[in-house]
Image (spheres, grey):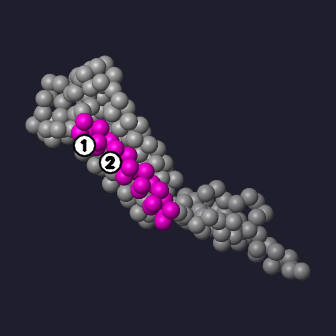
Amino acid sequence: TAGPSVTNTARRVRQVDRTALAALGGRDAPPKGETVGVTWMEGSMRDRAGMRGERTDLQRAAQLFGIIFLIVGIAGFIPGITTDYDELTAFDHEGAQVLGFIGVNILENIVHLLYGVAGLALARTWDGSRNYFIGGGLIYLVLWLYGLVIDKDSSANFLGMNSASDWLHFVLGVAMVGIGVLLGRRDRPVATA
């Protein structure tokens, strides 16, 4: 058994470790009396990796998609980039057209902006990025199917969609789900014990 001075030294080291890790912004320190294991520290460091700028490819892709969606959302409000600008408030037929062929309206532009903000916010974590791609992609695939079955000149066309926007929703849906699944497998964080 260890003598009293060794035991006291070990207690002080554990207390310093707990205090230092908490001060570094990691997870809460391990419970009192529990030593700081390598596995616990690796998990804590991986959780903080995004805060130090060390992002996975999945997180960088979510950030890129967020920026692109913000640009598209803003472009939808700029006359010239968006033609038939007076149709931006149409909620019962094909609305305005971004780049002269992709049907949108004010609601869809707002959705693009929200997708952009979500992409940037969720890019902070691996799980958030994966959920952004898979969940967002599934929503776009539902929008694609919805656009295929509705009458484009009815009140069901509340997003001002046209055939070009339908197929863009399909491409975005497949791409987003694919990125979420493929990069999600490749970038999966190592599980800790």
SS assignment at label 1: helix
Give the amino acid at mark 2.
Val
* Residue 22 percent coordinates (x, y): 61, 59
The dot on residue 58 is none
* Residue 80 percent coordinates (x, y): 10, 37
Give the amino acid at mark 1.
Val
Question: 10 Å neighbourhood of mark 1: few (<14), some, or many (≥20)?
Answer: some
Tell me: 27 left or right of 48.
right
Tell me: 20 left or right of 53.
right
Q: Is the stretch drawn in magenta largely helix, strand or loop?
A: helix
Residue 140 visible in this rendered orientation of the protein: yes
The residue identified by callout 1 is 72
The answer to which quarter of the image holds residue 3 is bottom right
The residue identified by callout 2 is 171
The structure residue drawn at horizontal position 58% and vertical position 66%, both measured from the top left corner, is 190
* Residue 35 percent coordinates (x, y): 73, 68
* Sequence-wise first label, 2 or 1: 1
Label 2 – label 1 distance at C-alpha: 15 Å
The structure residue drawn at horizontal position 57% and vertical position 59%, both measured from the top left corner, is 26
The structure residue drawn at horizontal position 21% and vertical position 27%, both measured from the top left corner, is 95
The structure residue drawn at horizontal position 46% and vertical position 44%, both measured from the top left corner, is 135
* As drawn, 87 above or below 32: above
Q: Which residues are magenta?
A: 163-187
Q: Nearer the viewer, residue 187 or 142?
A: 142
* Residue 47 percent coordinates (x, y): 54, 60
Quadrant where the image shows the N terminus? bottom right
* As drawn, 109 above or below 125: above
Nearer to us of marks 2 and 1 is 2
Furthest residue toward right:
1
Q: Nearer the viewer, residue 22 or 118?
A: 118
